[in-house]
Image: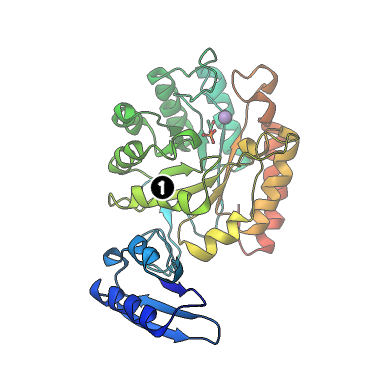
Amino acid sequence: MIVVMDPGATRDHVDHVIKMIEEMGLKSHPIFGTDRTVVAAIGDKRNADKSSLEQAPFVDKVVEILAPYKRASLEVRSERSTVATSPGGFAFGERKIGVIAGPCSVEDRTKLIEVAHAVKEAGAIGLRGGAFKPRTDPYSFRGLGEPGLEILAEAREQTGLAVCTEVMDVNDVALVAKYADILQIGARNMHNFNLLVAAARANKPIMLKRGWSATFDEFLLAAEYIMNEGNDRVLLCERGIRTHESYVRNTLPLAIIPAVRRRSHLPIVIDPSHGTGHAYMVPSMCRAAVAAGADGLLVEVHGDPERAMTDGAQSLTPEVFAATMSELTPIATAVDRSV
Ligand code: PEP
Ligand code: MN
């Protein structure tokens, strides 16, 4: 923490701040400038009381230097993490970029099994599909529930793909974890801290989607909730944020890739489907995400997007998905990765 003094602060005001910092069990390090004095407070931040320092006379502001998240931060762990989908299975964060593909929701057995084989053939390592769907409109299709999970498990058996599916409720964690390899926490639930804790305790990797109005720090703090339960297997998923733009469903900030790489050791996965809302934009955003250093992609693929029960407009056909995967190969090679 750095305490920035007002330009009019006297030596007494600075000494008062130094005394407060030392009473908190922290070391103080004043730097006297020509216009202003700043005092660095060094030590275990848990002892620090930022708000009381802010109220001390002639204090302009108190600035945090270290990230508020710890376990998710590069400050505490300097090597990049790898997150295995199952013991000995594919791991995100290694050289190979993990692509998880499949429909927005599980609609029926035949269609799901068919699309699972198609995405596997094209090079995906995981199968996505919601059995519990968070829908803004309560009258729309809300998923098949447990029968949907059974279909996903059958598809895994046939293809070997890791199953990534959403859990929406604390009470469903055990059920979803029984079938899933990766538990997805949706954008609408990123701030549902009880769900984060319950999902973390299932001891499965977590695909944590960023809330569409969450800041970068809030996103990382949500990851911290999971990691605080002793579960380090967090995949950060950028799925776009809400902005004033209307030519896209969400605005996809790919700059989060270098930002995550600078501040966190966790793998970063990009979801260009929700990130744009339009199938025609998805291949280019996949290419851009790979070029920028993404560790994974989450892509909606449907055998018949026009008739999809959810998110058809942003779903690729299996053919376009396969073509996109081929286009990713040279880009991945150029950035010393593979797909
Ligand atoms: C989804 O993956 O289908 C989904 C509902 O995503 P989000 O939570 O990002 O809206
Ligand atoms: Mn969807």
Classify mark 1: helix, strand or loop. Answer: helix
Q: From the viewer's perspective, tell me whether residue 76 is left or right of residue 282.
A: left
Residue 319 seen by the camera: yes
Query: Residue 50 at what x, y percent from top left?
Result: 36, 63
Residue 165 falls in which quadrant of the image? top left
Q: From the viewer's perspective, tell me whether residue 241 is left or right of residue 223.
A: right
Query: Residue 175 at what x, y percent from top left?
Result: 31, 27
* Extreme residue toward the top, this view: 139
Coloring basis for residues? rainbow
What type is the residue that disc 1 sits on? Ala
Q: Is residue 237 shown above or below 266?
A: above
Residue 87 seen by the camera: no
Query: Residue 125 at what x, y percent from top left?
Result: 52, 43
Q: Which residue is mark 1?
A: 222
Q: From the viewer's perspective, tell me whether residue 119 is left or right of residue 31.
A: right
Q: From the viewer's perspective, tell me whether residue 119 is left or right of residue 199.
A: right
- For label 1, count other residues whose C-alpha is less than 10 Å away and answer few (under 14), some (14-19) or many (20+): many
Q: Is residue 136 shown above or below 163?
A: above
Quarter of the image that includes the N terminus: bottom left
Q: Is residue 17 shown above or below 314?
A: below
Residue at 50%, 37% in the rendered image: 187
Residue 35 falls in which quadrant of the image? bottom right
Q: How many marks?
A: 1
Q: Is residue 34 shown above or below 116?
A: below
Q: Within 8 Å: ligand 1 and the Cβ of disc 1?
A: no
| Residue in front for this viewpoint, 156 or 18 | 18
| Residue in front for this viewpoint, 185 or 308 | 185
| Residue in front for this viewpoint, 32 or 73 | 32
Query: Residue 296 at what x, y percent from top left?
Result: 55, 49
